[in-house]
Amino acid sequence: MPPISLVAVFAAAVSSFLLGGVWYAALFAKPWQAAAGLSDEDLKSRNMALVFGGSFLFALVGAFVFAMFLGPKPGLAFATGAGFAAGLAWVAGSFGINYLFEKRPLTLLLINGGYHTLQYTLIGAVIGWLG
């Protein structure tokens, strides 16, 4: 395993988690809810400790593995560009394949794919800056 900065990984996961809060609670709450077909009751019935704890854990794992992919001290420009490419091509692209088969709305792809594109861009930037 290449040496990676655990501080950078943790900071990248925190940044990802905070971005998700802004993205899904402030910017796109209602459009996302409608496109995902979730009612207010669906949202209220969730186990929030599981949702937020699990989300942070997934962000932490994603940031850790992405840092391993980037290698030690990847540089800000490279890491940010790689994050953008990974978010857009790998994550959003994979969602696009699934959403086509599942007949999910384009709005949901744009919201979720947009978040993950920005998420990995941010993860890459943080790792490139602090790593």
Image (tube, rainbow, N blue to C red):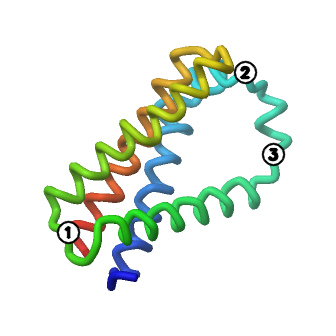
What percent of the width, then of the height, locates residue 119? 40, 48
Q: Earlier in the sequence, mark 3 or mark 2?
A: 2
Residue mark closest to the camera, 1 vs 2? 1
The quadrant where residue 55 appears: bottom right
The quadrant where residue 128 appears: bottom left
Residues tagged 1 and 2 counted as in contact (Cβ below 8 A): no
Residue denoted by label 2: 37
* Gap in angstroms between the C-alphas marked 3 and 1: 39 Å
Residue denoted by label 1: 74
At horizontal 72% and vertical 21% (from top left) the residue drawn is 37
Residue denoted by label 3: 46
Task: Please identify the quadrant where the N terminus is shown.
Answer: bottom left
At horizontal 61% and vertical 65% (from top left) the residue drawn is 57
Q: Nearer the viewer, residue 127 or 74?
A: 74
At horizontal 85% and vertical 41% (from top left) the residue drawn is 45
The 10 Å Cα crowd at callout 3, few under 14, some 14 to 19, many 20 or more, is few
The 10 Å Cα crowd at callout 1, few under 14, some 14 to 19, many 20 or more, is many
What percent of the width, then of the height, locates residue 58? 59, 60
Q: Amino acid at mark 1?
A: Pro
Q: Earlier in the sequence, mark 1 or mark 2?
A: 2
Residue mark closest to the camera, 3 vs 1? 1
Q: Amino acid at mark 3?
A: Arg
In the figure, is residue 29 to the left or right of 131?
Answer: right
Q: Amino acid at mark 2?
A: Gly
Q: Nearer the viewer, residue 131 or 38?
A: 131
In the figure, is residue 21 to the left or right of 49?
Answer: left
